[in-house]
Image: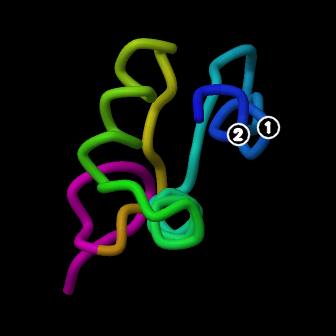
Amino acid sequence: MTKLVLKHTTQVDGSPRLSCHRAHVLAEDSAVSLKAIGSICNEQGIKIVNCQLGCFGDKTVV
C-alpha cells in the first residue's frame, strides 16, 4: 500500500504531497481506511493538501 500512496504523491518544492481527494480515492479503490492512508502519509512525511474539509492545504472554507 505504501508504494501505491507514493506513486500518487507529487513533489512540491521538494516536499511530498497528496491531495485529500486522491487519498479518498486510494482508500476506496484499495478497500482500506482513510486512517491507514493517513498513517502511511505520516510515516513517509507526506503532507495532505487541498483538504475537502478545509483543514489542510490551500483550500479556504467560507
Regarding mark 2 in the picture, which secondary structure is present there? helix
Residue 7, which numbered label?
1
Judge the density around disc 2: few (<14), some (14-19), many (≥20) Cα neighbours within 10 Å. Answer: few
Closer to the eye: label 2 or 1 = 2
Among all residues in the image, which is located at the extreme front?
31
Please say if the residues under marks 2 and 1 sit with CB atoms less than 8 Å apart.
Answer: yes
At 35% from the left edge and 74% from the top edge, which residue is drawn? 52
Q: Amino acid at mark 2?
A: Leu
Regarding mark 1 in the picture, which secondary structure is present there? helix
Query: How far across and how far down the image is residue 17, in percent?
Result: 60, 36
Query: How far across and how far down the image is residue 19, in percent?
Result: 55, 56
At 37% from the left edge and 62% from the top edge, which residue is drawn? 51
Residue 38, which numbered label?
none
Give the quarter of the image for residue 61. Answer: bottom left
Residue 60 part of the magenta segment: yes
Query: What range of the chain is rendered magenta?
Result: 53-62
Judge the density around disc 1: few (<14), some (14-19), many (≥20) Cα neighbours within 10 Å. Answer: few
Q: Is residue 52 above or below residue 16?
A: below
Asked if residue 6 lies left or right of residue 40, the reply is right
Q: CA distance from mark 2 to mark 1?
A: 5 Å
How is the rendered protein coloured? rainbow
Q: Amino acid at mark 1?
A: Lys
Identify the residue position indicated by label 2 in the image.
Answer: 4
In the picture, the quarter occupied by the N terminus is top right
Q: Is residue 28 above or below residue 16?
A: below
